[in-house]
Image (tube, rainbow, N blue to C red):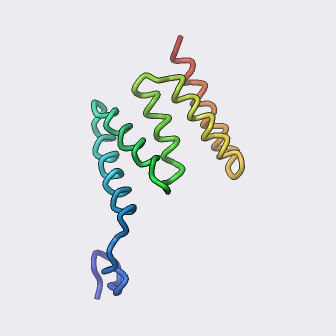
Amino acid sequence: MRAGGHEFTPELLTPAQPLDVVLRVLGNIRAWAADRPEHARTQLWATELALLLPRHPAQLRLERAELLVRTGDFLGGAREMDEYAGILDAFDPDAATKVRQEARAARHRLN
């Protein structure tokens, strides 16, 4: 039997862990706010809460940096981008270079 495009297995009935539920709810808030530019601060809030959890996608650090820039904290966002680029250096130097370019662009917005 298929359910939602996936083969039904007993594992699908396993309850979600609380941390997974919280990450999902915060992800839903971030997605909702992303479609509404006037709610960038709500998206930033949900991102910052997700970063406080013991495990989260590393991509959230870049999302936070971009949101800081979008809400006017150009230096803070650029600093976060540089830190994230340092992480990327180990496994994706091209992406790290691109993030550093975004950080420079954020700093230039101060002029």
Q: Is residue 93 left or right of residue 58?
A: right
Q: Position of residue 73 (x, y in %)?
A: 46, 23
- In this rendering, the answer to whether 6 lies above or below 43 is below
The residue at the point 67 percent across, 49 percent down is: 92
Q: Residue at x 34, y 50 (%)?
A: 26
Q: Where residue 97 sits in the image (x, y, percent)?
A: 67, 37
Q: In terms of image quadrants, where is residue 9?
A: bottom left
Residue 61, position in %: x, y? Answer: 52, 43
For image coordinates 52% across by 41% down, the residue present is 62
Position in image of residue 103 (x %, y %):
58, 29
Q: Nearer the viewer, residue 57 or 53?
A: 53
Count of numbered labels shown in the rendering:
0
Q: Quarter holding the N terminus?
A: bottom left
Quarter of the image holding residue 95? top right
Determine whether 105 is above or below 84 in the image.
above
Relative depth, front residue between 6 and 43:
43
- Identify the residue at the far top of this view: 111
